[in-house]
Image (cartoon, rainbow, N blue to C red):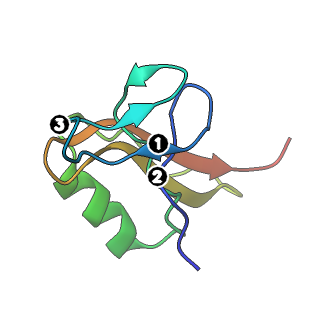
């Protein structure tokens, strides 16, 4: 199942560009760069986000012992490219 883009500020639904707007719209926040669903971790998923975005994707490498790369997401769309990225890593407390 694939999730839907959402507002990066409130997590609410966003409307895609169409006849009346040329950008993604949130009912609460107006024009936003949509937060795309989190992509499960893989080298291929990380490469997809790196190539789609116009901003750096930062990930500590090599990861400390016991740490895992657990997901990646970006805000933006295919027209404008990614405008923000998030890399998730988890490890021991």
Location of residue 83 by image quarter:
top left
Q: Secondary structure at mark 1?
A: strand
Q: Quadrant of the N terminus?
A: bottom right
Say few, some or many: other residues with alpha carbon within 10 Å of mark 1 (under 14 / 14 to 19 / 20 or more). many
Residue 19 appears at what percent x and percent y?
18, 45
The residue where tag 1 is placed is: 14
* Relative to 73, 92 lies left or right: right
Distance of mark 3 from mark 2, alpha carbons? 16 Å
Label 2 near label 1: C-beta < 8 Å?
A: yes
Could you say which is closer to the camera, residue 18 or residue 53? 18
In the current view of this chain or complex, which residue is farthest to the bottom? Answer: 1
The residue where tag 3 is placed is: 22
The residue where tag 2 is placed is: 5
Say few, some or many: other residues with alpha carbon within 10 Å of mark 2 (under 14 / 14 to 19 / 20 or more). many
Say few, some or many: other residues with alpha carbon within 10 Å of mark 3 (under 14 / 14 to 19 / 20 or more). few
* Relative to 6, 75 lies left or right: left
- Nearest to the eye among marks 1 and 2: give it: 1
Residue 32 appears at what percent x and percent y?
37, 28
Q: Mark yes or no: residue 61 visible.
A: no
Label 2 near label 3: C-beta < 8 Å?
A: no
């Amino acid at each position: 199942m694939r999730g839907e883009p959402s507002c990066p500020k409130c997590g609410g639904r966003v409307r895609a560009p169409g006849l009346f707007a040329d950008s993604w719209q949130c009912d609460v926040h107006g024009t936003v760069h949509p937060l795309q669903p989190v992509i499960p971790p893989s080298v291929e998923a990380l490469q997809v986000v790196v190539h789609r975005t116009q901003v750096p994707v930062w990930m500590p490498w090599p990861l400390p012992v016991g740490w895992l790369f657990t997901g990646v997401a970006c805000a933006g769309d295919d027209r404008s490219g990614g405008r923000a990225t998030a890399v998730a890593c988890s490890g021991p407390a």
